[in-house]
Image (tube, rainbow, N blue to C red):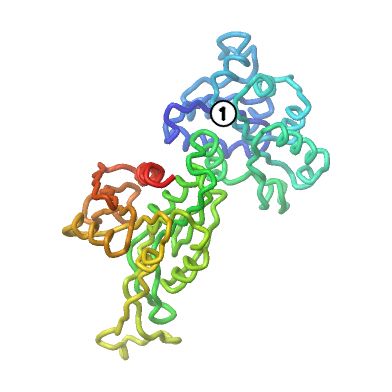
């Protein structure tokens, strides 16, 4: 996702510096071009050799470093970067930047850049709460610098409180917003549903399906990056919603229906990517059913068709459905468009290798209510989400 993006990382002298290694690895995994500048204090916590190996670029510590190509490297790097990420950002470095210091290579680059600057503070809780630090941080925010705020957690000193470096996904999300964000859907409200529902039979058993939620979460993230105000309603999953999304967790189809009904009136675009169970047990046992007394059959009833209910009274909403079919897919998906009054449907076959549930990739066909059909090759679910969003923007926004 970061292909051709140039990310300059500044590493300063805090114990959390070791965490930058995994962040660099993730950025390189997503094809970013990464350069690293480390302060002298930073080298006490993580070695330049480690950072050079991970970033696949020489590491620079000062303007007169042997790795520097010239004595104006602060200008060269400042102009090269699409974004500067300072992680961890110590209270000392934040104070220096806030007060216009340019007394090392990193602070000089920040003063010379016109690119966005993201700071990830990490420090002891007393330092974090100190009014002088808070004043410096506020000054930088007012100047347009972006903060990935510290979190509450266990600190290096053994204490617990504010000042812990934000987890890597939040830092990556901040980079996504800066490097990939657009305003195409700015001002639009979008509802996305994801994952599966679980229909309980007794306290330990339930009816469900294999949906992991990856496709719906990718759609929600992509919509947020395009500027939409996103509400994500999801069944059970092991995923983390994108920062800034309004997130509602549910378990059953009835809970999904209630949550959708509650937030639906204010939504303009609805993407129903969740795999809602079609059936649920007619009766629930408050105690675990013993296998010796288990009935030979379980009586089931249909769950509410949430997508059809929306389509029957959608008004001016743009409605997107998903179809999982193992045979006669296009025919079935087109019928679903008509039956449920959809504007767009995304079809996939879980029997295809690299498609469907749990996989990080998908193979889909996108069909609109005018009969246009676009078959996509295998791609990541993030790429599929981008294609879906392109269709929504073209036909609605």
Q: Position of residue 388 (x, y in %)?
A: 36, 46
Residue in front for this viewpoint, 312 or 392: 312
* Residue identified by numbered label 1: 83
Q: Is residue 274 left or right of residue 127?
A: left
Q: Does residue 98 lie above or below 316 as drawn?
A: above
Where is residue 198, by image quadrant?
A: bottom left
Q: Position of residue 165 (x, y in %)?
A: 64, 44
State the residue lying farthest toward the bottom: 293
Residue in front for this viewpoint, 380 or 324: 324
Residue in front for this viewpoint, 359 or 336: 336
Question: Residue at (46%, 30%) from the top-left corner?
Answer: 32
Q: Position of residue 105 (x, y in %)?
A: 66, 19
Question: Residue at (55%, 23%) from the top-left corner?
Answer: 81
Q: Secondary structure at mark 1?
A: strand
Q: Does residue 329 lie above or below 6 as drawn?
A: below
Q: Is residue 137 left or right of residue 312?
A: right
Number of residues whose C-alpha sits closer than 10 Å to that of mark 1, classed few (under 14), some (14–19) or many (20 or more) = many
Q: Is residue 2 left or right of residue 352?
A: right
Residue in front for this viewpoint, 275 or 237: 275
Quadrant the C terminus occupies? top left
Where is residue 293, by image quadrant?
A: bottom left
Q: Position of residue 367 (x, y in %)?
A: 27, 50
Question: Residue at (48%, 53%) from the top-left corner?
Answer: 190
């Amino acid at each position: 996702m970061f292909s051709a993006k140039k990310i300059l990382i500044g590493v300063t002298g805090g114990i959390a510096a070791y965490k930058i290694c995994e962040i660099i690895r993730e950025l390189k995994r997503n094809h970013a071009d990464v350069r690293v500048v480390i302060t002298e204090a930073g080298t006490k916590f993580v070695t330049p050799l480690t950072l050079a190996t991970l970033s696949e670029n020489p590491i620079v510590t000062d303007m007169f470093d042997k790795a520097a190509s010239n004595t104006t490297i602060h200008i060269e790097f400042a102009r090269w970067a699409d974004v500067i990420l300072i992680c961890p950002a110590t209270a000392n470095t934040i104070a220096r930047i806030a007060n216009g210091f340019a007394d090392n290579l990193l602070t000089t680059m920040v003063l010379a850049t016109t690119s966005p600057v993201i700071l990830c503070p990490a420090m002891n809780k007393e330092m974090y709460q100190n009014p002088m630090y808070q004043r410096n941080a506020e000054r930088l925010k007012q100047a347009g610098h972006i903060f990935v705020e510290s979190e509450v957690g266990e600190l290096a000193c053994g204490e617990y409180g504010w000042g812990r470096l934000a987890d890597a996904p939040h830092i990556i999300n901040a980079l996504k917003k800066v490097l990939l964000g657009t305003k195409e859907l700015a001002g639009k409200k979008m509802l996305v549903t994801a994952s599966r529902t679980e229909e309980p039979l007794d306290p330990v058993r339930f009816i469900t399906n294999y949906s992991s939620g990856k496709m719906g979460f990718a759609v929600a993230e992509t919509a947020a990056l395009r500027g939409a105000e996103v509400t994500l309603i999801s069944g059970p999953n092991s995923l983390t919603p994108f920062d800034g999304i309004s997130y509602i967790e549910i378990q059953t189809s009835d809970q999904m229906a209630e949550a959708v009904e509650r937030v639906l009136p204010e939504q303009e675009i609805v993407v129903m990517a969740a795999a809602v169970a079609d059936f649920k047990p007619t009766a629930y046992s408050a105690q675990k059913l013993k296998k010796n007394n288990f009935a030979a059959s379980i009586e089931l009833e249909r769950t509410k068709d949430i997508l059809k209910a929306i389509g029957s009274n959608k008004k001016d909403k743009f409605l997107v459905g998903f179809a999982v079919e193992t045979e006669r897919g296009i025919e079935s998906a087109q019928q679903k468009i008509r039956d449920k009054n959809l504007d767009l449907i995304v079809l996939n076959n879980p029997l295809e290798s690299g498609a469907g549930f749990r996989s990080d990739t998908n193979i889909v066909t996108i069909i609109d209510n005018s009969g246009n059909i676009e078959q996509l090759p295998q791609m990541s679910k993030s790429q599929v989400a981008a294609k879906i969003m392109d269709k929504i923007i073209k036909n609605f926004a």
